[in-house]
Image (tube, rainbow, N blue to C red):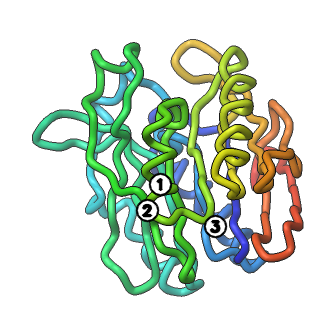
Amino acid sequence: MKICLAQTKPITGDITSNVAQHKRIIAQASDHGAALVIFPELSLTSYEPALAKELATDQHDPRLDDFQTLSDTHQITIGVGLPTQTEAGICISMVLFQPQQLRRTYSKKYIHADEEPFFVRGQNFPTLTVNQTEVGLAICYELSIPEHAAQAAHSGAEIYIASVAKFTNGVEKASQRLAEIARQYGIPVLMSNCVGPADGAECAGQSAVWDAQGMSLGQLGDTEEGIIIFDTDTQELITQTFGDNP
């Protein structure tokens, strides 16, 4: 199975423009034969906690309908990030689109203390089935919680993918932790990060893939947008970077 990691530079608060960008990347992922494409944390809004209340929506937002069409047409599973409104409050979420299936929302269960003024803990599930492969998902801070990876592994995860918005001061630590998860559970681990401004800082990119021994197979740089295509069968990896208009 081929997995695409997207490394994007979201336009702050502009869901419509970010949807258009995502659609272009999904088309490229499909051209590479990807069965799954994962975008960074809050990829459709940028990671801006102070704006979450006004930007929050849900999986039924009609602006997301094209993702279901693309999923059905290209037989590809798509995970996009945005804040979602629930009865309990606003969650950091990934809305998932799978071919001919109802869309689902994976919400961040473990949130950082800095996020607590803006977000609440959400509901999620330990694995997502893609092409008969069990994929463990994580949103940013969750990767640092041992119980999270343990639950995914206990539920049969064969791959672990973290969707993050990591700054320069956090991406190295996250990479070390993800390599550790790969070694501990003997599965490939992937990270999709964004670049550009977010929450008063700069996201650091370096989206990457580690093999089941925790060895780095490759990564993108820290400033450019791009994609990584990882073949889980051959362990081959393709990277591609974009200009301003992928």
CA neighbours of label 3 inside 10 A, class few (<14), some (14 to 19), many (20+): many
Q: Judge whether 245 appears above or below 28 on screen.
A: above
Q: Distance between the residues labelled 1 and 2?
A: 5 Å
- Tell me the SS state at disc 3: helix
Front: mark 3 or 2: 2
Provide the residue designation for mark 3.
26
Q: Position of residue 63 (x, y in %)?
A: 37, 60
Which residue is painted at 73% across and 46% down in the image?
A: 183
CA neighbours of label 1 inside 10 A, class few (<14), some (14 to 19), many (20+): many
Provide the residue designation for mark 1.
152
Q: Is residue 14 visible?
A: no
Camera-side residue of 189 and 79: 189
Query: Mark 2 is on which residue type?
Result: Ser
Looking at the image, do the residues carrying marks 3 and 2 touch, with CB atoms under 8 Å apart? no
CA neighbours of label 2 inside 10 A, class few (<14), some (14 to 19), many (20+): some
- Tell me the SS state at disc 1: helix
Which residue is painted at 42% across and 63% down in the image?
A: 96
Quadrant of the frame with the N terminus: bottom right
Q: Judge whether 111 appears above or below 211 on screen.
A: above
Q: Distance between the residues labelled 1 and 3?
A: 26 Å
Which residue is painted at 57% across and 75% down in the image?
A: 133
Camera-side residue of 208 and 226: 208
Query: Mark 1 is on which residue type?
Result: Ala
Provide the residue designation for mark 2.
155
Looking at the image, do the residues carrying marks 1 and 2 touch, with CB atoms under 8 Å apart? yes
Q: Where is residue 166 in the image (x, y as percent from the top left)?
A: 62, 27
Horizontal side of 242 relative to 110 (left or right) equals right
Horizontal side of 4 relative to 119 (left or right) equals right
Q: How far apart are marks 3 and 2 (CA)?
A: 28 Å
Q: Can residue 125 be seen in this view?
A: yes
Q: Which quadrant of the figure has residue 132?
A: bottom right
